[in-house]
Image: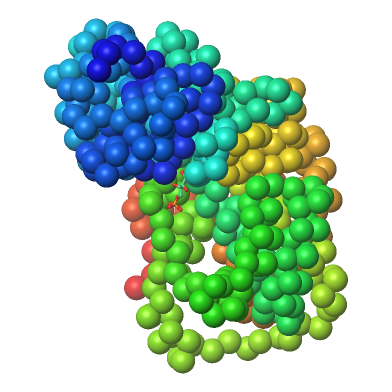
Amino acid sequence: MPTQQYDYGMIGLGTMGCNLVYNMCDHGYSVAGFDKDTAKVDALINEAEGKKVTGMHTVEDFFAALKSPKVIMLLVPAGKPVDAVVAELKPFLSKDDLVMDCGNSHFTDTDRRTTELIKEQIHFMGVGISGGEFGARHGPSIMPGGAKEAYERVAPMLKDISAKVNGEPCVTWLGPGSAGHYVKMVHNGIEYGMMQLIAEAYHLLKECTDLSNDDLHAIFVKWNEGRLKSYLIEITADIFAQQDDLTGNRLVDMILDTSKQNGTGQWTSQSAMDLYLPIPDIDAAVSARDLSAMKIERLAAEKILNWHKVNFTNTINELVDWLEQALYFSIITAYAQGMALMQRASKEFNYDLKLDLVASIWRGGCIIRSVLLEDILSAYTAEPGLANLMVNKDMALKLEGAQDGFRLAIKTGVNTGVPMPAMMASLAYYDGYRRGWLPANLVQAQRDYFGAHTYERTDRKGTFHTQWNQNAE
Ligand code: 6PG
């Protein structure tokens, strides 16, 4: 076998890895793949017949097949598997080689791996890739971080394989270190938020009406023709139309109501808490998944906990209209929270993120792509240092225009006992953010009362403590 003939190496030949390999191959790049599972290697060899793609059964052969300096992409599960692969590769890597972790790794792991490998003059990049199997094959949104010079080496390839919007590639260098994986994590946090918001709209429609899945399909198709146009609304419309091969029912009705998660939403919430930055829509979405997983407890509680339902007496058309406004409003706040988190993290971790660029590369290929991102891009292009997306003049008008219906949708949820944690969090975020005064003076007084934690005053500078008239027993 001729050595050093392949441009890129790919480790991890699952569906995502293989689809990326074929995507790269379509654009003229040659790729050698490796996976511990020899069946996957054999499958790649068979399927890639006639293409500039091959599979290798040992790490030695894999390295021998790659041009130097080597560029190796990893698509293996986050966490220990990435460390195990890096440890296995390390003896074979030399100066100027580049390892790109294209999975959903935790950003702190990416920083640790980058620091370890650069000691040996080996570059490591954390590269977020979004778009699922289809995106990997036909054009994902790509979120690379790491050393800029390392990015420049792979930029032409990444641009070639990425999704395009108006001819512009959905990839750009985001910042040093773990910037790419941080942005991908927040992407996923927003993804959790949007999915939960859509699920809440579905729940309210189901509770208040007897709409069929065909009706729901039609409503989502219609919504997708307007300002809610987005990948997640589009696939939701498709989901309502899908038949179940086993029963002939609609598949959505046959799926158990417990959602799983791989951690990226939870990481987003954890990081936001660490940075004291509120992202309540996303927190609520993570908690909603946790609650959904408590199926046995919920079934038991259903027999014990009652509520006094107020029947829904408005029309279906009114409810659909309110929910369209509710989704529009709350999806804006979910993006706003994600953007605010990236802005805070950028300062804390010195990423120097450009939020207009982030919005730009999210417009195509990724799971949270939507027409709204065009407006978000305009907002950050006009005002790169915008304190919060919601206070951009156009966004503020959009929120104002959608809030009457949003409040009515939430009232309907309250009256009918439908849990709408993400929507309620969204409204509370808005109502809290737009208030110059919040009741935190009372919280400070309580802290000072029981713990002498001190407080600041409205009329003079300094910190104060009071001997409160302690009458409480
Ligand atoms: C993407 C997705 C992808 C994956 C999520 C799912 O951008 O293509 O976000 O990364 O499907 O990790 O996350 P959960 O399994 O936690 O829902």
As drawn, the residue found furthest toward the left would be 91
Residue appearing at x 74%, y 48% in the figure: 229
The quarter of the rendered structure image containing the C terminus is bottom left
Residue found 84% across the figure and 70% down from its top:
318
Q: Quadrant of residue 304?
A: bottom left
Can residue 162 be seen in the rendering of this structure?
yes
Residue 160 placed where, x, y %? 56, 21
**x and y, in percent, of residue 186 in the image:** 50, 39
Front-most of residues 97 and 401: 97
Number of numbered discs: 0
Tell me: residue 407, above or below residue 431. Answer: below
- Image check: 13 left or right of 285? left
Picture quarter containing residue 93? top left
Residue at image location 73% in from the left, 33% down from the top? 374
Image quarter in which the N terminus is found: top left
Horizontal arrangement in the rendering, residue 135 relative to residue 21 (left or right): right
Position in image of residue 235 (x %, y %):
64, 55
Extreme-bottom residue of the structure: 303
**Image side of residue 58 versus residue 412, left or right:** left
- Which of the 4 quarters of the picture holds residue 104? top left
| Nearest the eye: 162 or 54 | 54
Residue 317 versus residue 287: which sits nearer the camera?
Answer: 317
Residue 461 visible, this angle: no
Q: Position of residue 60 (x, y in %)?
A: 17, 22
Q: Residue at x 82, y 50 (%)?
A: 226
